Amino acid sequence: MPCPTAMRTKKAKAVGIPTIDLSESRARTSKAIVEACEEFGFFKLVNHGVSDQAIAGLERQGFDFFAKPAPEKRRAGPADPFGYGCKTIGPNGDTGELEYLLLRSDPAAIAETSLSISSDPPSFSYAVNEYIKSVKELACEILDLVGEGLWLPNKSIISGLIRDVQSDSVLRINHYPAVKHTEDWELSSKSHPSNNTRIGFGEHSDPQILTILRSNDVGGLQISLPGGLWVPVCPDPSAFYVLIGDAFQAMSNGRFVSVRHRAMANNSNKPRMSMMYFGAPPLNAWIAPLSELMLPHHPSMYQPFTWGQYKKAAYSLRLADSRLDLFKASK
């Protein structure tokens, strides 16, 4: 696929990014989700059932944390990979115009981490746990609908990986400061004076099974289509966006697309915050194309691997690298 560039963009409405309404019939919804996963690896989700209170509670905790002075925020870092990070993305030299919190999804780890993040650890832990519980159920419902849409004998074979008590799912909160505050960041992209062309978080795919993303009303997210076209996604705080990850592409034997995406630098006078739940299997779970999706004329595209092996490979590469290429089956 040609390398996407900032100059080749097209509005999401013109492209026709699908919107899935969970209030519609299961048969219609499951079919629409499968089609969206095949064509885009991405869709908008409305009538999702996650309460406004759960969303607002986590967003409030996030804004409260990122509003603190830098020395206070640094007490929750550096990200290793969990904790607070600023501008540095991963261990291999990638950077962005953002700061973030990366959190484990189990309550015990959240309670421990909250001590260095919040002046009110119980309130922070409650908000994070309530949000994770809600979006985890949403992720599993989506995966069960996928199972129905694919006519899998066990519709919960994929969601079971996320429901597992050893699931490696994580929560990430990204904060992109308003443009009026970025002068304090000593930005490296001096050659790009316009925020319209600066990258806040570089091109990548998510390694997990799927991502449940919610952002406030400030835009910045873009997804990549075949041919190198970038599509800006209009923000909708009342909706979620679902992104298919590398593990799901492998499990579908390439039928589903692990969507490549990026975030542009914030060019508004209001901060942007995105909250992402990354649904992942246990570290020792094997990832391989599902036998029900194998066809005689379409052999396995990928070698089996454990999630732990894939995660290790992901951390050894740069953000934009294609990790799945390391696990392609020999022809």
Image (cartoon, grey):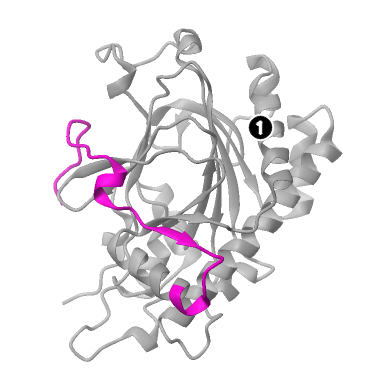
> For residue 138: magenta?
no
The image shows residue 46 at horizontal and vertical percentages of: 52, 55
Q: The C terminus appears in which quarter of the rendering?
A: bottom left
The image shows residue 271 at horizontal and vertical percentages of: 53, 23
| Relative horizontal placement of residue 20, taking residue 35 as reference (left or right) | right
Residue at 31%, 44% (x, y): give it.
Answer: 12
Residue at 67%, 14% (x, y): give it.
Answer: 69
Residue 219, picture quadrant: top left
The answer to which of 6 and 235 lies nearer the viewer is 235
Range covered by the magenta-colored residues: 1-28
Give the crowd class for mark 1: few <14, some 14-19, many >=20 residues within 10 Å: many
- Residue corresponding to mark 1: 62
> Would you say residue 268 is visible in this rendering?
yes
| Relative horizontal placement of residue 330, taking residue 100 as reference (left or right) | left
The answer to which of 133 and 215 lies nearer the viewer is 215
Residue at 31%, 58% (x, y): give it.
Answer: 40
| Relative horizontal placement of residue 202, taking residue 130 as reference (left or right) | left
The image shows residue 131 at horizontal and vertical percentages of: 69, 50
Label 1 sits on what residue type?
Gly
> For residue 15: magenta?
yes
What secondary structure is the magenta-colored segment mainly?
A: loop
Residue at 23%, 51% (x, y): give it.
Answer: 225
The residue furthest front is 24
The image shows residue 325 at horizontal and vertical percentages of: 26, 60
The answer to which of 206 and 62 lies nearer the viewer is 62
Check disc 1 and report its element: helix, strand or loop: helix
| Relative horizontal placement of residue 18, taking residue 113 as reference (left or right) | left
Residue 320, picture quadrant: top left
> Would you say residue 282 is visible in this rendering?
no
Q: Please, is residue 27 above or below residue 141 in the view? A: below
